[in-house]
């Protein structure tokens, strides 16, 4: 946390992070038990260095997206957030498992092969324990370009 944010927090003044969460409160509608703000608050906690709280929020968001059969958002939280958090902590076994689970989730006929290919490459790198945070983010970016080139929604057909 920056010195200014620390001083503001110590003085009782709300930080930008808190203001953001407060502003999101009205739209924090449940997503199968997970608020929309869970990934955002997880990112805020990660930036603060609170990996435990960040991981908890990312897992809640991911579970909600999977319950909704929303493969895209589950993959984004898994790759951009959880995998990066696990990699920072050296938890390669969890990264491997996460990547394998995402490949299984994406095994749907209505999803583009390019997205699955990117995810498989990421999973293979995780299996070899060569996946980096930059690679995970790159994989997420590739999936984003393929699945949501114009902002269209993409989930799993159920």
Image: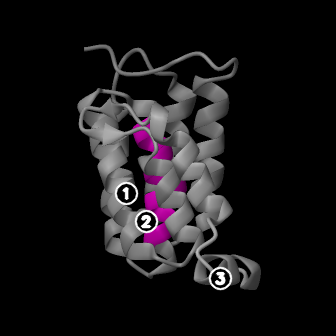
Give the Cα separation between the discs numbered 3 and 1: 22 Å
Q: Would you say 70 lies left or right of 122 here? A: left
Q: Are marks 2 and 1 in contact (CB under 8 Å)?
A: yes
**Residue at image point 33% right, 51% down:** 100
How far across and how far down the image is residue 155, in percent? 41, 22
Q: Does the magenta run of residues contain 85?
A: yes
Direction from residue 118 to residue 57 in the image, left or right? left
Q: Would you say residue 149 sits in the magenta stretch? A: no
The x and y percentages for residue 127 are 40, 65
Residue placed under numbered mark 1 in the picture: 57
Secondary structure category for the residue under label 2: helix
Residue shown at the point (46%, 76%) measured from the top left? 50
Single out the mark in the foreground, 2 or 3: 3
The percent coordinates of residue 90 (x first, y second) are 44, 82
Quarter of the N terminus within the rendering: bottom right
Please report the residue visible at 37 percent of the width from the left and 57 percent of the height from the top: 57
- Quadrant in the rendering for residue 82: bottom left
- The circle drawn on residue 6 is 3
Is 145 on the left or on the right of 50, as rendered?
right
Image point 32% across, 14% down: which residue? 157
Coloring basis for residues: one colour
Packing grade of label 2 (10 A; few <14, some 14-19, many >=20) is: many
Q: Is residue 129 something one can see in this rendering? A: no
**Residue 109, image x, y percentages:** 37, 17
Q: CA distance from mark 2 to mark 1?
A: 5 Å
Quadrant of the snapshot with the C terminus: top left
**Magenta stretch?**
73-86
Label number found at residue 54: 2
| 82 shown above or below 74 | below
> Does residue 15 lie above or below 12 as drawn?
above
Q: Is residue 1 above or below residue 62?
A: below
The mark nearer the N terminus, 3 or 1, is: 3
């Amino acid at each position: 946390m920056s010195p200014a944010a620390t001083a503001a927090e110590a003085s009782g003044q709300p930080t930008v992070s808190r203001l953001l969460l407060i502003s999101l409160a009205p739209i924090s509608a449940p997503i199968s038990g997970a608020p929309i703000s869970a990934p955002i608050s997880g990112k805020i906690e990660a930036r603060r260095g609170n990996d435990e709280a960040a991981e908890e929020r990312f897992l809640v968001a991911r579970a909600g997206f999977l319950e909704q059969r929303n493969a895209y958002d589950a993959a984004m939280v898994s790759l951009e957030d959880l995998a990066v958090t696990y990699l920072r902590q050296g938890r390669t076994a969890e990264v491997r498992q996460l990547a394998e689970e995402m490949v299984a989730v994406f095994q749907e006929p209505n999803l583009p092969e390019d997205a699955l290919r990117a995810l498989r490459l990421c999973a293979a790198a995780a299996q070899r324990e060569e996946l980096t945070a930059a690679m995970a983010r790159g994989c997420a970016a590739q999936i984003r370009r393929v699945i949501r080139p114009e902002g269209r929604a993409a989930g799993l057909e159920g």
